[in-house]
Image (cartoon, rainbow, N blue to C red):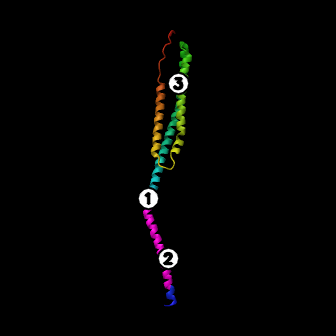
Amino acid sequence: MTADQILQITQIAFVIILFIPSLITIGVLIVVAWKFLPVMVKQVQQLIDNNAQLTKIAKQNADQFSTTEKTLAGITPELERQTKAIEAGNSLILTQGIDFRSYQTLVSDNMSNHSAQIEALKTAFDALPQRVLAAIDDSPKCQSILKEIQALRYEVGQVLNQQQAKRATGTMAKVDGEAS
């Protein structure tokens, strides 16, 4: 054998020595990718689905908050109308000789209760974004968020029903011993 042949054989052996570990490494990478790629794809899809659901819930919350703000803005003229009606009723009561202090206490208590309910409603809606953000801590809690939103809707419905029930007019009983 000549020196050139020995050099060529050495170069071929060197290439084979480098080529075999490279093939083994590529094979291992293919097996690892084949094994874990479906799991990674499933995780990415779950993250996409969760993000879409949370975006949908955030949009619903924003729409509901906007609607509630409009409703609360509509309450102010109604309160003014009720206040004028109460003042007109007070004038009528004064002219009829009914005990004005008892009536005023009753009206004041009702107005305080009405104002407290409105403030509680405003506070609940102001706290809604923070409650939603607190409920989302990078783990899928869509069901708990939906339950909280449903509970909030139920509370709002109860408050509105109570307000409507209090708006119903009653009759004033004639005080014994007074002329009409």
Whether residue 96 sits left or right of residue 39 in the image: it is: right
Magenta range: 8-37
Label 2 residue SS: helix
| Secondary structure mostly seen in the magenta stretch | helix
Q: Which residue is mark 3?
A: 110
Q: Which residue is mark 1?
A: 39
Q: Earlier in the sequence, mark 2 or mark 3?
A: 2
Q: Earlier in the sequence, mark 2 or mark 1?
A: 2
Q: Earlier in the sequence, mark 1 or mark 3?
A: 1
Q: Residue furthest right?
A: 101
The crowd level at tag 2 (other Cα within 10 Å; few <14, some 14-19, many 20+) is: few
Q: Residue at x 47, y 34 (%)?
A: 155
Residue type highlighted by circle 3 = Asn
Q: Indicate which label's residue lies in the foreground, 2 or 3.
A: 2
Q: Which residue is mark 2?
A: 18
The crowd level at tag 1 (other Cα within 10 Å; few <14, some 14-19, many 20+) is: few
